[in-house]
Image (cartoon, rainbow, N blue to C red):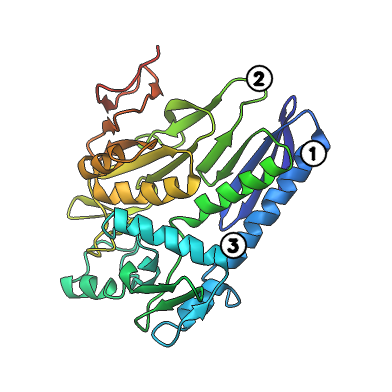
Amino acid sequence: MSISLLAKDAYKQVTKLMGVRYEITAVSDDEQLARKSIDEAILEIKRIEDLISSWDEKSETSAVNRNAGIKPVKVSQELFDLIVRSKKVSALTNGVFDISFASVDKIWKFDGSQTTIPSEEKIKLSVSKINYQNIVLDAEKKTVFLKEKGMKIGFGAIGKGYAANRAKAKMEALGIKDGVVNAGGDLITWGKMENDEDWSIGIANPKEKGEVMGWLIINDLSVVTSGNYEKFFLANGKKYSHIINPTTGYPATGTKSVTIICKDAELSDALATSVFILGAEKGIELIDKLKDIECLVITDKDEMKTSKGLQLNYYEENSLSTSANIKTVK
């Protein structure tokens, strides 16, 4: 863990939480308040990790999973509400987003060791227990019941966004009016930078690791990106992403990266994976139906496609093919 001064009145702390690198920034003219707010944000993220972890046997999530097919489990209002919201996203995406994806049999490997595709039978069996409709909720009793033995729930595709939201809320409650919580690339901003300008957020170039292809100027928004340029394998000349479609069992194809922009980091987190699986056409069609949410999709042919309202500033030398509704800045 390290802490450093970014610039006048801007403080950043870097630490590892929920298995990823968190960067938490507070802008304030009160150094003590800034540092206290960052500490409180970290405590909040740790608390949420304890709540939603499927690895911690003492967590509520683990209790729900242990009792799959056996009995309902009473949970806190907070976890119950998170599951309710998760199921709503599942319904919105026709099951492409599904927290019961934790039930999947891991037949795909993205460590460089796999070069062949599993059999159709194995693929079908691997997702046989995934079905958000089999997550039974009792609002009165605050219980969660997984109908089939072997079912599991997990929050890998929504948890970091939720934690970022909660960390922001803690910092704002302490009086921090400007800041950023960056959860391994899933980030949320509020207020302005220390120079009183809106936050400038770089968008990773899927063609060149470590490079930025453009940037977004945002205020009080979250930005979440899902990409396949780090974890994938090749079979018969075709790239297979680590992002699995829970409705088919196959890795998503046709997309390199998806960036979602909206006020809610939790929703951005869930939709980034969903749009990646749906692909550019269906994914953007979904986003265009939603209020105050935008997206940027890079296809496997390096085509850049966006939702109707997105304005992305990009570098003139960028070689990606762009769609007409992107604002260019020279």
Q: In this view, does 103 lie above or below 266?
A: below
Label 2: element kind: loop
Q: Is residue 7 left or right of residue 65?
A: right
Left or right for 300, reference 58: left
Q: Mark 1 points at which residue?
A: 33
Residue at 22% across, 69% down: 118
Label 1 neighbourhood size at 10 Å, few (<14), some (14-19), many (20+)? some
x 50%, y 30%: residue: 201
Check disc 2 and report the residue beneath it. Answer: 195
Could you tell me residue 236's position as x and y percent? 17, 55
Label 2 sits on what residue type?
A: Asn
Could you tell me if the residues under marks 1 and 2 are in contact, i.e. CB atoms within 8 Å?
no
The residue carrying mark 3 is 49
What residue is drawn where x is 37% and y is 48%? 271
Q: How far apart are marks 1 and 3 (CA)?
A: 24 Å
Question: Which residue occupies 48% across, 82% down?
Answer: 66
Residue 98 locus on image (x, y percent): 35, 62
> Is residue 83 in view from this perspective?
yes
Between 208 and 138, the one lying in front of the other is 138
Q: Hey, what amino acid is under mark 3?
A: Glu
**Secondary structure beneath label 1:** helix
Q: Is residue 170 left or right of residue 30?
A: left
Q: Residues within 10 Å of mark 2 (few under 14, many from 20)?
A: few
* Distance (Cα) linking label 2 and label 3: 33 Å
